[in-house]
């Protein structure tokens, strides 16, 4: 069976329209403060493919431009400069304010283009020199006053606004969006969650769920366990607490992985799935909290999860640990008065 093409190859060989859509999906991961991300591509777009707005004024306020160039050849200065001229002509005509960032996105760049953008002053000088001699129709068709306005606008613009973004960086950031699974359903991660071993000392993040467990031990071993420090004196309780901490950290590893490699929303989805099933089990009557927790853990380990990019990494131990994360949020409790 032929192997599936990598996400990088899928993007690199997509058509221009699909590439713009990929960029629109990626842009919010690059700058989460955008109020709106909008595609403009097409004739009369004035050099705007995807715009990220930082204010309600949109093109009249602060905004960023993402110029998409999905060509077979690497994007070089000649093509980039042509798009830059288009932008300055439109901005000088009042079509929009000059963006504070102008990002070229392409599968490949010439080696020289990022180096040219890395020296904004030299880049501006090169652009202005070419602007005075270009035969680009968009400039040639200007009146002398219009051309002067374009030159003055470019001369007073900080060319540090221009940059390139590497496709590998784009893919790493796109992976954190909800669109990744839809676009690349068969794309594997290089590695899943890193195993987290419970530290000898309990962390602050464990305080709430561990207290819930101590309540169970106090109920099951009256007069013997009243505080966390007394749990090690009862072997059954001590072994039980150690297992619960292993489960908690299995879920914690999943949470960290979702935060760093995908998006926190996927871990929240797992919590929602687990809670929607185990809450019914927890609501039943039991002799004590020990029995309630045991019943909940049995069910939690078999919960069917909503298919997301995170779901394949959620092993039974992590599903159980999610219950302790829910206990930390007071969404699950084990002991109830009057059950005995």
Image (cartoon, helix red, strand yellow):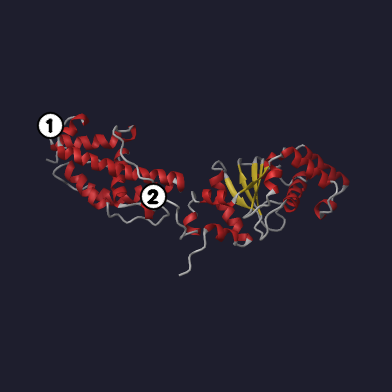
Decide which of tag 2 and tag 1 comes sooner along the chain.
1
Position above or below: 71 against 31:
below
Residue 303 screen position, x and y as percent: 30, 54
Q: Residue at x 87, y 48 (%)?
A: 143
Q: Quadrant of the C terminus?
A: top left
Q: Quadrant of the N terminus?
A: bottom left
What is the C-alpha distance between the residues marked 2 and 1? 39 Å
Q: Residue at x 29, y 49 (%)?
A: 317
| SS at badge 1 | loop
Q: Quadrant of residue 97?
A: top right
Residue 35 screen position, x and y as percent: 57, 43
Q: Give the camera-side residue of 302 and 90.
A: 302
Callout 1: few (<14), some (14-19), or many (20+) C-alpha neighbours within 10 Å? some
Q: Residue at x 13, y 44 (%)?
A: 287
Q: Which residue is mark 1?
A: 224
Give the number of the disc on residue 269.
2
C-beta proximity under 8 Å, tags 2 and 1: no
Residue 262 screen position, x and y as percent: 46, 48
């Amino acid at each position: 069976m032929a192997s599936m093409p990598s996400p990088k190859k899928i993007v690199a060989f997509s058509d221009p329209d699909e590439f713009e859509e990929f960029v629109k999906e990626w842009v919010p991961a690059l700058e989460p403060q955008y109020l709106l991300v909008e595609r403009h591509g097409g004739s009369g777009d004035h050099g705007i493919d995807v715009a990220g707005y930082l204010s309600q004024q949109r093109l009249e306020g602060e905004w960023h431009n993402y110029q998409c160039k999905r060509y077979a050849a690497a994007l070089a200065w000649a093509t980039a400069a042509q798009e830059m001229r288009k932008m300055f002509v439109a901005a000088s005509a009042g079509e929009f304010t000059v963006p504070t960032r102008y990002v070229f996105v392409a599968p490949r760049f010439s080696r020289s283009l990022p180096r040219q953008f890395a020296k904004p002053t030299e880049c501006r000088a090169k652009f202005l020199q070419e602007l005075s001699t270009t035969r680009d129709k968009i400039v040639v068709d200007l009146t002398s006053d219009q051309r002067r306005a374009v030159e003055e606008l470019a001369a007073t613009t900080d060319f540090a606004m221009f940059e390139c973004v590497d496709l590998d960086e784009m893919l790493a950031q796109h992976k954190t969006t909800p669109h990744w699974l839809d676009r690349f359903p068969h794309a594997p991660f290089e590695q899943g969650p890193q195993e987290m071993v419970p530290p000898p000392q309990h962390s602050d993040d464990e305080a709430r769920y561990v207290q819930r467990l101590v309540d169970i031990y106090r109920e099951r071993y009256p007069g013997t366990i009243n505080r966390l420090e007394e749990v090690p004196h009862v072997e059954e309780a001590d072994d039980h607490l150690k297992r619960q901490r292993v489960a908690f950290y299995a879920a914690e590893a999943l949470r960290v992985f979702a935060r760093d490699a995908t998006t926190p929303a996927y871990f929240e989805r797992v919590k929602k799935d687990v809670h929607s099933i185990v809450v019914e089990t927890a609501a039943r009557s039991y002799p004590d909290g020990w029995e309630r927790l045991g019943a909940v853990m049995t069910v939690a380990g078999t919960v069917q999860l909503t298919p997301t990019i995170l779901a394949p990494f959620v092993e039974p131990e992590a599903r159980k640990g999610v219950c302790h994360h829910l206990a930390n949020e007071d969404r699950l409790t084990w002991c109830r008065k009057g059950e005995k």
